Amino acid sequence: MFAEGLYDLGFRAMTSVPSVRGQGSSQGLGCGLALLRRGRILGTDRRGSIFMGRYDYDSNAAMAKVSVMLQVAPERELVTGFAAGADGATIEIEAAISEPAAKVETMVDVAGQPVVVTLTYVGPLPN
């Protein structure tokens, strides 16, 4: 089961994707923060995207199921090279994480591109 609290996030695109903004290739690396509390997730990345969703631990499968909606800020580009238009974009992301621990990695699909997400527990939230 996930510990409730603050998590540091690392994002790494699995493929080198040319930037659609004409600035060479996307760096392929990113970071962010997430708060997990009472089955809910709220977070942001350093590029201005916000994600909200839920997590649930399935004890029978010994797996945490995560579902978030990523709101990509207008005119922003993700680590995969995906670029939101003038209105931004919304991307649904789901993951299953076995054996949640203080630091875990999982692969997710972000708009058709594989991204490795590393979650590192930072600490509990104040009461």
Image (cartoon, rainbow, N blue to C red):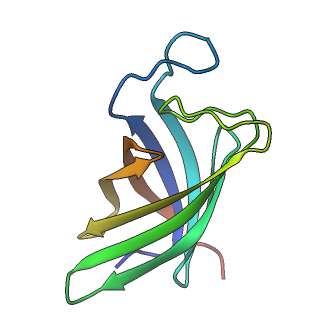
How many numbered discs, if any?
0
Q: Identify whether 113 is placed above or below 51.
A: above
Residue at the right extreme, as displayed: 86
Is 44 positioned to the left or the right of 17 in the image?
Answer: right
Q: Identify whether 9 is placed above or below 5.
A: above
Residue at 43% x, 23% y is: 17
Is 5 positioned to the left or the right of 88 in the image?
Answer: left
* Image quadrant where one finds the C terminus: bottom right
Corner quadrant of residue 76 = top right
Residue 53 visible: yes
Residue at the left extreme, as displayed: 61
Q: Residue 126, how many percent across, how many down?
A: 65, 76
Q: Residue 49, how many percent across, how many down?
A: 67, 47
Residue 125 versus residue 76: which sits nearer the camera? 76
* Image quadrant where one finds the N terminus: bottom left
Q: Identify whether 89 is placed above or below 28.
A: below
Residue 124 visible: no
Q: Residue 113, how many percent across, how many down?
A: 39, 40
Q: Residue 75, how many percent across, how many down?
A: 74, 33
Residue 41 versus residue 73: which sits nearer the camera? 73
Residue at 79% x, 44% y is: 87
Residue 73 versus residue 105: which sits nearer the camera? 73
Residue at 33% x, 75% y is: 64
Is 70 positioned to the left or the right of 103 in the image?
Answer: right
